[in-house]
Amino acid sequence: MNKKNLLFTMLVFIFAIGTLVGCSGGEETSGGSDQELNNENMKPEDFKGELDIWTFFGGVEGMAKSFEEKYPNVTVNVEVFPGDQYQTKLMTAIQSRTDVPDIFDLERSYMGRFINQEFVANLSEMGKIEDRVENYVPYVKSLGEGKDGNVKAVSDHSSPGAFWYHRDLAKKYLGTDDPEKVSEMVSSWDKVIELGQKVYEESGGKVHLLSHYGDVFNVEKQHQEKWIQNGKLVIDPAWKDIFMDMKQIREKNVDAKLPYFSGGWGDALNEGGVIMFAMPAWGGFMVNNDGGQAKGKYGLAKTPSGYYEGGTFRAIYEGSDNKELAYEFIRYISGEEWQTKNLEETGNMPALKSVYEKKLDTYTHEFFGDQKILKQYYELVQDIPPHEAGEDQNAISTLFYDAASAAIDNGESYEQALERFKKLVSNGYPELEIE
């Protein structure tokens, strides 16, 4: 996230706080979620009516179509809004309590600001949702829980990341394109740095192992202590290791200096010049596959630590008069039937461990040839620690990355990066105690 996007997010947060005051003035909302629904005993044809869903993600339209196919007497209306307008649109509707959808999507980066609010229905009180998510990948289950431990939002995917690598370049410069062997060669950042130096030297500076040192940050940012504890800023010592790995990757020519999602980054992903990229499982849309040219082009290797990128969760509006149908939709997307179908049709990695386990030895994706990529992803998702959807965790991590990047680009030390980081946090969070 760049500074412009961070500023936008902070402004939306300020706006949201103001509107939430107007939403919680003591007036009861209709359709309270204190009564357990009887969906477990109903058949698909028993459900009737229309369901309204708001999202920023076009893929929800396919999800809605699949639901309608199984539930013949239901119509699902999906409205997709641009991502930079979505939060404001949703909060405006909630504030005015007019035209609020039955279900609304929340993106991982900001869902912590919503999930504990009164307008988000308590799914645990509405049915046996715990039974549905009990077999979830732990961090996906945890992210959907409120501070009280109840389930407030549910995702149908896990969004893990891994190293995607060009097979031809791996054979030439790494000596193999075998996923297991490549995974071992990059199983630590020390190994990545050593291997990256070798690639740079042998290619005469024409090929780099990584696109950008930002891969270290993306892979490791979910493994530290929480930034905010008891009103204080806590800086996990592991952040120094992350900074030093990023700095060495730049200084030793391991990366091609191509920032994530930049034009040059996209060119390298499709055409070469860089061997591997830390990529989310949903990133296939960035691959040029015209005429099937990407078929078998990539291998998938494990990153030094498990990580995920992004993620979309669905919540029910507490004031909805259509809770029974809305809850059934949540039940549907949290089940094996939909998540298996979604995996096979879109390549989105499931949230259910059981779907991983049943498909480990059979699932393949066109980009990766015959490789059974679920094996790598399943091992990675189990390495990711569960944590709640903290309101400020992602935003403060982004401030650290901004400070670290500036220091690395200017040839500065970790101590200088830390000084810049603390100033950024102090400006954005004046209420925090910062040593």
Image (spheres, helix red, strand yellow):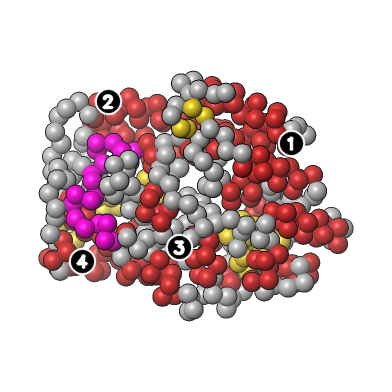
Nearer to me, 339 or 133: 133
Q: CA distance from mark 2 to mark 3?
A: 37 Å
Q: Is residue 198 left or right of residue 294?
A: right
- First reached walking from the N terminus: tag 4 or tag 1: 4
- Image spot of residue 310 (x, y percent): 47, 50
Identify the residue under disc 3: 348
Q: Is residue 200 left or right of residue 160?
A: right
Specify the segment rendered in magenta: 114-132
Q: Nearer the viewer, mark 4 or mark 2?
A: 2
Identify the residue under disc 2: 21
Q: CA distance from mark 4 to mark 3?
A: 23 Å
Identify the residue under disc 4: 71
Residue type at mark 1?
Asp
- Image spot of residue 394 (x, y percent): 49, 39
Q: Nearer the viewer, mark 4 or mark 3?
A: 3
* Residue depicted at 23% across the width and 46% down the height: 122
* Disc 1 crowd, CA 10 A, few/some/many (<14, 14-19, 20+): few
